[in-house]
Amino acid sequence: MLHLSRLIGRPVRDSSADAIGVIDDLIAAVGTSHPPITGLVVRTGRRRIYLGWSSVEQIDAAGATISATRVNISRFRRREDEILLKGDLLDKQIVDIDGRKVVRANDVILDFIDGAMRLVAVDVGTAGLLRRLGLPDAWVDRLSGERSRVASYIDWEDVDPLGSTIASVRLRVPHAGLSELHPADLATIVDQLTPRDRADIFNTLDEEVAAEALEELEPETRTDLLEDLEPERAADLLEEMSPDEAADAVAELSPLSRKEILRLMTKEERDDVQELLAHPEKSAGGLMTTEHVALRPQATAAEALAAIRRHKPDAEVAFAVYVVDGRRRLLGEVTLRDLVLASPAATVGALMEDEPVAVELLAHSDEVARVVTRYGLVAVPVVDVAHRLMGVITVSDALWDVLPEEWRREMPRRLHADSLAAAGPQELPARATTKRSTKSAPKSAAKVRKGPPRNKSSVKRG
Amino acid sequence: MANLRLRDLFRRRRGPLAFLAVVGPGLIAGVAGNDAGGITTYATLGSQTGLRFLWILPLTTLLLALVQESVARLGVVTGQGLSDLIRERFGVRWALFAMVVLLLANLANTVANVAGAASALAIFNVPILITAPLAALTVWVLVVYGTYRSVERIFLALTAVFLAYIAAALLANPNWATVASSLTTPNLGGVSGAEMLLLVAVVGTTVTPYMQFYLQSAVAEKGIGVEELGAARADAILGSIWTNFIAACVVIATAVALGSLGKPIASAAEAAVALEPLAGSFSKILFGAGLFGASLLAMAIMPLTTAFALAEAFGFESGVDKRLREAPIFYGIFTAILAIGAIVVMLPGLNPIGAIISSQYLQGLFLPIVLAFIVKLSSSKALLGEHASPRWLRLIGWGSVAILAILNVGIVVVNLLGLAA
């Protein structure tokens, strides 16, 4: 095992043991899980030259020896898929995907695996710092302590290198690891980043993942981010978000970007968002989403389930379908449980609970929260003065305004498939268990379990 | 102003801070510049040297504007804090060096503000040995147990008292022709060693190292886009002019009230005399309240900025929303600085006003080092691209570093020789 800090500045000798320069940097070809080192940057006098790895005979803390016969020296030029370990990685911010944190690379760990020198881990602990200060190994060990040293290595597989802060050099990083994260965790990380890194990440993420993470971001971060993105990309992401969250996000934008982004959205999504924007912020209308499943009384249970499959509403919205008459007046509601248990041919008109609890468009958000709490609802329908169904408010949106601020950070804005699965500890989502290494297992498990186990209690209603 | 979560603070646009949030970090940083150290140093300049050295203020305004513009530019374009950038561009050793400098400077400033709080309450006959530990403990509890944000506004409101200096300077009715000529004609003729120290303290208290770290983090956290760079610049420059305008008023008001004595102010009660034309017998209470508020505010900000900057540079857990156990190093640094500040002020025989002036002199001593980092970073084409400092700005920047460094070395040498002789 080698530390980058112990290599930089060490002499590079040819076969006759004459020093031709010092090691200035190491180059790795990114893309694989443990990228191989592909070359050296050597400083000779004032020049930086590139030395292919094939001409390096030996490298250790004493320096590098190159074979004279195979030397292939050229002036250093950076290639697309390569990173400079010192120039691009050392001292820069990286995301510890496993620990869900933004940290700084204090040192880089290299090792021989499968016959090649590879980049295996990043040291983010005290030991790395001390080594960088040039302290001898014995001191580093004594001052940092064995246990903390191992714990502060992050396997390269769990590292997401952020773009460089250097304006002239933009690294192309796929951010594959980040898109594996729970949206709430991803949002926590993105909240810690610089605006430029945020935009970079959101440009590479899959649309669905990006939209879910957007819903979880702090409102101000979200606004900044949407304005930093290309308007087309922002519009695409907003279309992917649930209409009420999209409306909240659009409402915060500056008038100019709001107009531009709305123009680029599809007509259907734009209409939804604009309708929601018209309602006062602190009213039921401002809280609701237009997303829901509404059926006529004569529809059957089988048709109702088919409608849910077709519309794919968010988890909380899917807990019930609403029964309306020809003029969309709310007649009743049928819970998902009743639909599943009923015979497929039964009509929703027969299954429905008459006169369900509903709130009016202009009801204050406090009242909505009270109604949702009193009746233990997962979602409450919103009606206008003529009792026509306008939309649905989910429990997380209903309670958002009344929660103490510290709790809000902990609360997911949406129920995600993961939070549901994670309610039982024995059923941790596969994602969390596979991404885990021994180091922080309890932490990541706790993180995923944070979503309240609402799926147990909330199906029943008063 | 306090950067307990800068982000939260600037985001929440209601309450008495709403105005400040809109006006921007530069202006806030400007008002915050007039803490216990600032007010005491300017008052001493007025009482000890009268109107003679008013010309230093336009120069420090220029320096402050240049520095804050550079820092705002760095924050806007890179989206990162100053210690972040020092670490990324110069590596661990330079970052450690910069952090040691910042730590020492902020320690000194914390001492100044504990001393400020102590001398403010001394007006009301509360002994220093009681005020110093109690004030430190209060600030510690407020920050660690998270009620700080609510009290912060009270402290901040108290500092508005210093705006009274504007009226006081007008009412003092100095010879405005003298004021004008003194402002515009730099004259170092017959300057004594003590006066030289005082001038460096004035530079140091105006362009404090910590403020640059604070401002850049604030700008970066606010996520101001490059398209708003012009506004951020104007904000930084107007803020500098605004701070020094108040500073000039303090000097003028004090010079008229006490300048005939030609010696430093001895206590906060004496400094309050300058407000008498405006507030009469009420002036001591007014001044005491303002000084107390400013000191407590700075007692929280100074250790916090240090802890945040160190966390930025070395990557440990930080944030006041964390629990003690979650961010032990962060809270450790915060606690240690506050405790040392209180203990130093409690040392027997320490003159609070003298301690404040000395600490501001230390700020001036460290300034060229911090300034060098800022000039170097802000002229980097690789970092800022087209927004890198132009040639003339680089020249002025390095020129200022050189002048300040020579001045400081000179003073240190002269004082050492003086001690030896």
Image (cartoon, coloured by chain):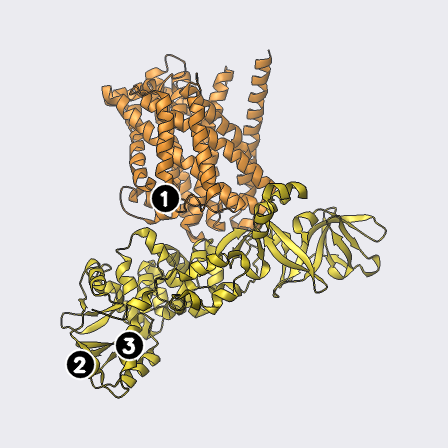
Chain colours: A yellow, B orange
Q: Which residue is mark 2?
A: A325
Dot 1 falls on a residue whose secondary structure is loop
Residues at marks 2 and 1, common chain?
A: no
Q: Position of residue B150 (x, y in %)?
A: 30, 41
Q: Using the image, name the chain to which the residue with label 2 belongs.
A: A
Quadrant for the C terminus of chain B in the image: top right
Q: Is residue A159 visible?
A: no
Q: Residue at x 56, y 48 (%)?
A: A148
Of residues B46 and A405, the one nearer the viewer is A405
Q: Is residue A289 left or right of residue B390?
A: left
Dot 2 falls on a residue whose secondary structure is loop
Q: Is residue B348 visible?
A: yes
**Dot 3 or dot 2, earlier in sequence:** 2
Q: Amino acid at mark 3?
A: Arg
Quadrant of the rendered image containing residue A388 = bottom left
Q: Which residue is mark 1?
A: B24
Question: In this rendering, which labeled residue sits more in front, label 1 or label 3?
Answer: 3
Dot 3 falls on a residue whose secondary structure is helix
Residue A337 - label: 3
Relative to A68, residue A428 above or below: below
Residue A373 - label: none
Relative to A270, residue A156 above or below: above
Q: Using the image, name the chain to which the residue with label 3 belongs.
A: A
